[in-house]
């Protein structure tokens, strides 16, 4: 397995995600308006709060709302009720911040319990899957780099990782 090109890609992704995360943790928005409901996702063109999910989205185990897209990354809100199937993203790095609920992020060698406010980074090619452990659905803010095309999801088979 070649790692050529991986470190620059991770460095760029880290810089993009760090900038975005620092904007998410900005205090002045909340300090100026006590009525603002958390959590929120601040992007250059809009401030997003947890959406009202449609009947169709509520009926699905996983619902994805695209938020923003650039040449380097795409952002999404993902609602999870239940669990994902184990899988890989071969061409995309993924960073998530749990905005609402509780979940467990499963990797090949460990499971990590996540609560609202927790962040995880999943490099491309990493075996993983998420499981909602709350009474209601969990919602994450997800950043894919490069922009997610909806196709890069390879199911894990019994012999993998």
Image (cartoon, rainbow, N blue to C red):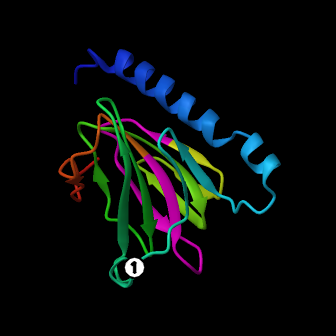
Query: Which residues, given as a range, are shown in magenta?
Result: 121-142
Please identify the quarter of the rendering in which residue 94 is found. Answer: top left
Residue at (32% x, 81% y) in the render: 56
The quarter in which the N terminus is drawn is top left
Kind of element beneath mark 1: loop
Residue 61 among magenta residues: no
Going by the image, does 146 lie left or right of 122?
Answer: left
62 or 111, which lies in front? 62
Q: Residue at x 24, y 36 (%)?
A: 91
Q: Nearer the viewer, residue 81 or 108?
A: 81
With 154 as the anchor, is 122 left or right in this view?
right
Q: Is residue 133 magenta?
A: yes
Q: Residue furthest left?
A: 151
**Residue shown at 61% from the left, 54% from the top:** 40
> Does 138 appear above or below 93?
below
Can you give x and y, in whole percent of width and height, for residue 9 in the image?
35, 21
The residue nearer to you, when weighing 127 against 90, is: 90
Relative image position of residue 51 (x, y in whole percent): 50, 68
Q: Which residue is mark 1?
A: 54
């Amino acid at each position: 397995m070649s790692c050529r090109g991986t470190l620059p890609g991770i460095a760029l992704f880290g810089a993009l995600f760090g900038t975005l995360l620092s904007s998410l943790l900005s205090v002045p928005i909340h300090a100026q308006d006590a009525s603002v409901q958390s959590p929120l996702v601040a992007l250059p063109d809009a401030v997003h709060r947890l959406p009202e999910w449609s009947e169709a989205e509520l009926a699905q185990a996983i619902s994805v709302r695209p938020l923003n897209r650039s040449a380097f990354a795409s952002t999404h809100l993902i609602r999870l009720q239940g669990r994902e199937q184990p899988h890989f993203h071969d061409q995309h790095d993924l960073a998530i911040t749990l905005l609402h609920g509780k979940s467990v992020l499963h990797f090949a060698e460990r499971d990590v319990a996540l609560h609202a406010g927790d962040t995880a980074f999943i490099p491309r090619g990493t075996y993983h899957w998420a499981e909602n452990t709350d009474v209601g659905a969990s919602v994450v803010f997800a950043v894919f780099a490069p922009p997610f095309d909806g196709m890069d999801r390879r199911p894990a088979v019994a012999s993998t990782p």
